[in-house]
Amino acid sequence: MRFYLFQASSEHPLSKAIVEHTKKLREQYGSHNDHMMESRDFEVHPGAGVSANVEGKLVLVGNKRLMQEFEVPLSPEVEAYMSEMEELARTCVLVAIDKIICGALAVSDPLKPEAGRVISYLKSMGISSIMVTGDNWATAKSIAKEVGIDQVFAEIDPVGKAEKIKDLQVQSPILLCWDYFWHCTLVVFMLTLFCS
């Protein structure tokens, strides 16, 4: 329940989902009078996670990149868990308190049912689809394969996504950038023009 108040400060869709789920669990199992700890020095690390001071302890919630940024060691057990979840196309969110991993969440965002059909239809019109995502490589490749996207750029923070779009624009006109599949993925549709 302590995790709830910390995540409530974040605007990220994953955080919002965690907060909503925690509210339901709290209503179902917890007392409404439970002590809630407040966080201070809350900071968003774009594309990596969040950090805050909770009762004098540094609390980190985010991906592997955030843990590396704060020099949090990952045990072989944590690495194995992350690999296993990534192979299942799940994103791993790690929780550390004072530079010690104390938990992990595996989250997945189901694809919209029509995603594969849309990509297939666009391919039939000569439009390429490229995925640009902050998710890990294993998850990104799995999702791309499922919907028929051939080119993937993963583990890219929000600033990097904008730069990647600019780079792609040099190669071919971009028809549309579409945040379609889930919260942090851009699918870029490019039309390749053939002139004789």
Image (cartoon, rainbow, N blue to C red):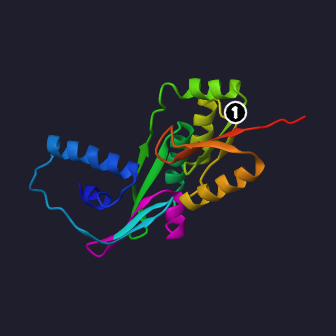
Residue 98: quarter of image:
bottom left
Mark 1 neighbour density, 10 Å: few (under 14) some (14–19) many (20 or more): some
Q: Nearer the viewer, residue 133 or 188?
A: 188
Q: Which residue is drawn at 41% across and 63% down?
A: 50
Q: Which residue is drawn at 44% across and 52% down?
A: 93
Q: In this view, does 49 lie above or below 133?
A: below
Estimate the x, y position of residue 81 in percent, counting from the top left.
50, 46
Whether residue 151 sits left or right of residue 159 in the image: it is right
Where's the N terminus, which quadrant? bottom left
Q: Does the magenta stretch include residue 55?
A: yes
| Residue on which the image places disc 1 | 127
Q: Residue at x 47, y 48 (%)?
A: 92
Q: Does the magenta stretch include residue 135?
A: no
Residue at the right extreme, as displayed: 196
Residue 29: quarter of image:
top left
Where's the C terminus, which quadrant? top right
Kind of residue at disc 1: Ile
Estimate the x, y position of residue 63 in percent, counting from the top left.
49, 56
Whether residue 7 sits left or right of residue 130 in the image: it is left
Read off the magenta span.
Answer: 53-72
Q: What element carries label 1?
A: strand
Whether residue 166 sits left or right of residue 52 in the image: it is right
Q: Nearer the viewer, residue 71 or 40?
A: 40
Estimate the x, y position of residue 31 in percent, counting from the top left.
11, 50
Residue at the front extreme, as displayed: 196
Estimate the x, y position of residue 141 in percent, counting from the top left.
63, 39
Q: Which residue is drawn at 53% across and 69% down?
A: 69
